[in-house]
Amino acid sequence: MSWASVGRRMAHVAAILLVALILGTACHEVLGHGLTGVLVGGRIGYVEILGVQVWPELGWHGWPDTYGLCAVTDVPDGTAGAVMRLAGSMSTWLVSVLAVALLWLRRWRGWPRFVLVCLSIWWIDLLTYTLPSWGLRRSILWGPVYSEPYEAAIALGVRGWAFQAFAIGTSALLATATWMAIRHGRQVGHPGDVDDGGAGGID
């Protein structure tokens, strides 16, 4: 393997992680917390993604202590609030499950494959946000020592150890399934490749 090939692979990995971080944070905050909060009777005050306020006005607030924030007001206490808090990490987890399934259903190429791989690693959100339940920071070296999905699950009656096992177990399964789909280009169910007409992506 040449150095140029190694460089291209590293660039692909870096691009995947960057895109996954930005879009994953937006999904966690807007679709997870925001949409769920509205559905249970709340209102979105503002949304911040990686230090950038995107709603109701656009502005730079500086790098925050957390990856993002969706301020939802007027959410009833109790079950509704717990569901909204849990929905953040579960929204990205569900997208990851769907993306992994699509990677296995067809042999994707180009940009479709790139996007699916980005989405498939969103399980990282649930896993890293569960780390504080063991006393670690969310990103190990930085971030809050507060596990939002873990505390929300407990508030909904889920056993702490069961939620931890769920986070670790499903993350391992999704990571393995993604790696196998990328490594072997496995097809299940539908023959043929799906391309985007020549756009770049992951080979």
Image (cartoon, helix red, strand yellow):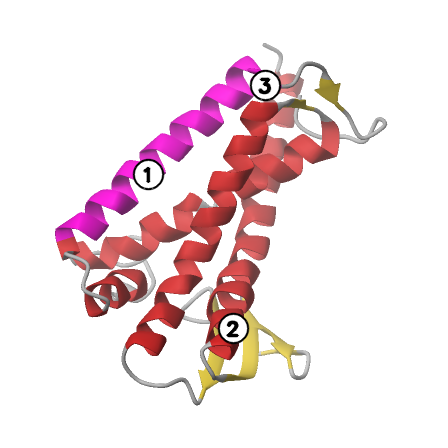
Q: Residues within 10 Å of mark 3 (few under 14, many from 20)?
A: few
Q: Could you tell me if residue 121 is visible in this image? A: no
The residue indicated by pointer 1 is 170
Q: Residues within 10 Å of mark 1 (few under 14, many from 20)?
A: some
Q: Is residue 165 left or right of residue 37?
A: left
Residue sitting at x 36%, y 52%: 126
Q: Which quadrant of the view contains residue 9?
A: top right
The residue indicated by pointer 3 is 189
The segment highlighted magenta reads: 161-189
Relative to 33, say whether 24 is above or below. above
The reply to whether dot 3 and dot 1 touch (C-beta < 8 Å) is: no
Relative to 45, say whether 86 is above or below. above
The C terminus - image quarter: top right
- Percent x, y of residue 42: 48, 84
The residue indicated by pointer 2 is 34
Q: Secondary structure at mark 3?
A: loop
Amino acid at circle 1: Thr
Amino acid at circle 3: Gly
Residue 46: assigned label: none
Q: CA distance from mark 1 to mark 2?
A: 25 Å
Q: Residues within 10 Å of mark 2 (few under 14, many from 20)?
A: many
Amino acid at circle 2: Gly
- Percent x, y of residue 193: 72, 18
Q: Could you tell me if residue 22 is visible in this image? A: yes
Residue sitting at x 47%, y 82%: 72
Q: What residue occupies the far bottom of the structure in this picture?
A: 74
